[in-house]
Image: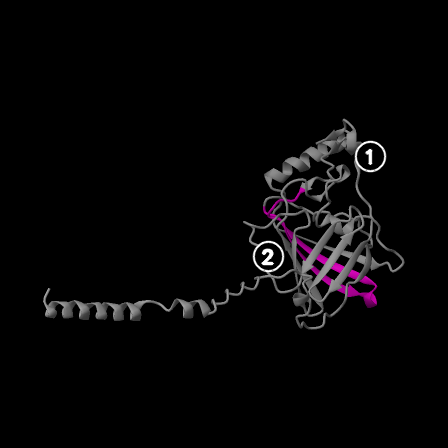
């Protein structure tokens, strides 16, 4: 091999070595470089109503405070949500109404679900012959009915209703509240569609399209509540039913745990009697 050829090969080796040295990463330097911090988890779109961060948000002072124990007490009216004069039911609801009328004439009971310990649901939950305790927080109101300890939460932290496609339907629905002057307005939707009644004795059913708007005022120096109800349910009746109810404050009462158990209702024909039409 000639000297010139040996020199050419040596020159090429030097170039390749230089190129590799430049192109190769410095592994020792790379190992000392800190890894990037993981991205922070996104803040939840909605925090719980009792989360400290939610409770601590500044809000205007409420016009009144519902905290206390209340008993339904509408002068000259029953505890039930009687339909207005000339009411018109849908064909589906009329079937239940007619069956209840027939059963009553025969001395029987039709679909007495509350007697069988199904939850009374809204609006009936508000007017049973037991008190309702209310606890008002800056962002919500908790209402607990003594009978069955049925509870509803009124959310007042600015959230909207859950999309019906993903909402978990309940007997008391999802209640969203807001203040309009000195009136508390509560809008409730997302109800269950079965074993839920607007009027249990007349057997007027509620459906999953029930929509209740309550307008609550505190009267008589905070000793009474007045609630105007607007009820719509296009699957059960035509138009809007408006009903006004009142409650009186009962400061000498606490609610207790009152569970509905069939063995406590043995005296009721709706529990086990053949006269109960289910």
| Residue 154: percent from left, percent from top | 69, 58
What secondary structure predominates along the stretch shown in magenta?
strand
Discs 2/1, front? 1
Circle 2: element type:
loop
Which image quadrant: the N terminus?
bottom left
Q: Residue at x 87, y 60 (%)?
A: 251
Spatial CA distance of label 2 from label 1 is: 38 Å
Q: Nearer the viewer, residue 104 or 159?
A: 159
Q: Nearer the viewer, residue 82 or 205?
A: 205
| Residue 56: percent from left, percent from top | 68, 70
Indicate whether 106 appears above or below 68: above
Disc ID at residue 161: 2
Q: Is residue 181 left or right of residue 164?
A: right
Q: Determine which quarter of the picture holds residue 62.
A: bottom right
Q: Determine which quarter of the picture holds residue 134.
A: bottom right
**Coloured how?**
one colour
Circle 1: element type:
helix
Return the disc, 2 or 1, that comes first in the chain's sequence: 2
Disc ID at residue 263: 1
Q: Residues within 10 Å of mark 2 (few under 14, many from 20)?
A: some
| Residue 191: percent from left, percent from top | 63, 48
Indicate whether 23 appears above or below 163: below
Q: Is residue 236 left or right of residue 66?
A: left
Residue extending farthest to the top is 274
The span shown in magenta is: 205-234
* Magenta stretch contains residue 226: yes
């Amino acid at each position: 091999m000639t000297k010139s050829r040996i020199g050419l090969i040596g020159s090429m080796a030097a170039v390749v070595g230089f190129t590799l040295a430049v192109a190769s990463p410095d592994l020792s330097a790379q190992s000392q470089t800190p890894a990037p911090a993981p991205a922070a988890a996104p803040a939840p779109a909605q925090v719980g109503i009792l989360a400290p961060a939610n409770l601590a948000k500044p809000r205007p002072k409420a016009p009144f405070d519902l905290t206390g124990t209340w008993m339904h007490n509408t002068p000259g009216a029953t505890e039930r949500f009687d339909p207005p004069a000339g009411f018109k039911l849908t064909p589906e609801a009329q079937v239940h109404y007619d069956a209840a009328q027939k059963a009553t004439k025969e001395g029987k009971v039709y679909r007495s679900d509350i007697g069988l310990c199904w939850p009374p649901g809204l609006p009936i939950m508000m007017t049973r012959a037991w008190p309702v305790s209310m606890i008002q927080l800056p962002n919500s109101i908790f209402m607990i009915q003594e009978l069955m300890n049925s509870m509803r939460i009124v959310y007042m932290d600015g959230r909207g209703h859950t999309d019906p496609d993903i909402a978990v339907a309940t007997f008391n629905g999802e209640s969203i509240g807001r203040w309009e002057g000195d009136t508390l307005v509560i809008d409730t939707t997302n109800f269950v569609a079965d074993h839920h009644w607007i009027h249990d004795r007349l057997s007027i059913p509620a459906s999953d399209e029930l929509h209740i708007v309550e307008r609550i005022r505190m009267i008589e120096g905070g000793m009474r509540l007045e609630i105007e109800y607007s009820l719509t349910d296009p699957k059960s009746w035509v138009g809007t039913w408006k009903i006004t109810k009142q409650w009186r404050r009962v400061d000498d009462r606490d609610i207790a745990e009152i569970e509905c158990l069939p063995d406590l209702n043995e005296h009721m024909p709706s529990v086990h009697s053949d006269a109960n039409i289910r």
